[in-house]
Image (tube, grey):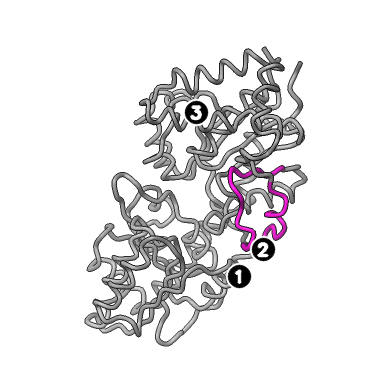
Amino acid sequence: MCTAEPRVIGYLARILPILSETFVVREIAELRRRGVEVRPFSLYTPDLSVIHPEAPALAKEIEVLVRPKHPLFWAAHVTVLLRSPVRYFRCLWQYVLTANEPWDRRLRCLAYFTVAPFAALRLRRARVGHLHAHFANAATSVAMMAAELAGIPFSFTAHAYDIFVDDLLLSAKIPAAAFVVTCSQFNVRYLREHYPAAAKAAIDVVHVGVDPTVFTSRPVLQEMPPLVLAVGRLVETKGFHTLIEACARLPSNGVESQCHIIGEGPEVERLSRLITALRLSERVALLGKLPPAEVLAYYHKATLFVMPSCVRRNNRDGIPTVLIEAMAMGIPVVSTRVSGIPELVCDGETGLLTDPDDPVGLAEAITRLLDNRELAAQLARAGRELVLREFNIRVSVQKLLHLFAGTRDFQEET
């Protein structure tokens, strides 16, 4: 039996939607705007409290796949085994029993395999002809196995942690996928250098895109004191500790400012203690998690945006979406020479770059832009132009559509 033409594209993520991964929602929304039927799937229950302006009802559409209490979850193994025994045992053999992974990691492979038959049946039921996963770890592990069992092609977008740290089965996923996309040329080079299977694989750069009609250019602000804004999960690799230390140095540089950091995460207590120890409570505030609409309001008030990313145990950012959002709005930015960030923030052209974990250099860069508003405006204009040209959701989705179109000719099920 031949697989169906991909009239429907399935999208799978570990948790969809989730506040920290707005780019997946934007991608789905733009595909739908172009008339593509997209069915969203999530491994785990989505955050129903999060309302994304681009797709406010998306959370209600999600089909959750990790449902061991569902009456059909375990029965799906019997169904798929009887219908497609070759596919079932091939999947089990390749991706679990003989997987090129240590035994402790094979247990994770087995866990993903337990989900795959149920996922495959749900994909068939939704008439999905192509499955695309975001993040190369958990979601793509299930996507690869479920696609094998369903007899459809799959693809995935690789980002950061899923390449640099949690690379389970990545050597198998790359050649098995119809195509692989990632957010930066840095990631392409990293994959080709560290995974032999990537040498001949189709790996394309598709930038995370923003909607320029949502993130519109705003007038140049003369906020007093100037507002330095940062947004992201409160994890060590975001480098917010360096930003706080840099803020402590700004008065000695003759700069008065306030700093707001939006986000939540495991580093909140450490960062709070650092703010107290440096006596910055009146100038630096941790605002916690905010919905997209409120984050957008802070972008409108920001004088400067800072993303001080760093590297820890090989973990690092890809290209932070918040940097793209800020630049789309014409906010001057300061970031660090980490991963693919220099592909967006070209030092002295579209923003300023410093070395990671360098509070002195970061304080100097912040001071330079707050003191020289003409330079800040020049960099902001160039940054917005770059985003409109290369980090635009319409441009990114057009590339994806071209890649999806190349997977329409499927092989007969064997």
- On whether residue 60 falls in the magenta region, the answer is yes
| Numbered range of the magenta stretch | 39-62
Q: Residues within 10 Å of mark 3 (few under 14, many from 20)?
A: some
Instruction: Give above or below for 366 relative to 392.
Output: below
Dot label at residue 53: 2
**Distance CA(mark 1)–CA(mark 2):** 8 Å
Dot label at residue 293: 1
Q: Position of residue 278 (x, y in %)?
A: 24, 78
Instruction: Give above or below for 251 relative to 145.
Output: below
Q: Position of residue 296 (x, y in %)?
A: 57, 70
Tag 1 near tag 2, CB within 8 Å: yes
Look at the numbered disc 2 and give the secondary structure of its residue: loop
Lower position in the chain sequence, tag 1 or tag 3: 3
Locate residue 300: give its quadrant. bottom right
Question: Along the horizontal axis of the image, is 358 left or right of 385?
Answer: left
Residue at left 30%, top 75%? Answer: 275
Residue at left 63%, top 41%? Answer: 67
Dot label at residue 110: 3
Lower position in the chain sequence, tag 1 or tag 2: 2
Residue at left 40%, top 48%? Answer: 340
* Foreground of the two, 178 or 102: 102
**Distance CA(mark 1)–CA(mark 3):** 40 Å
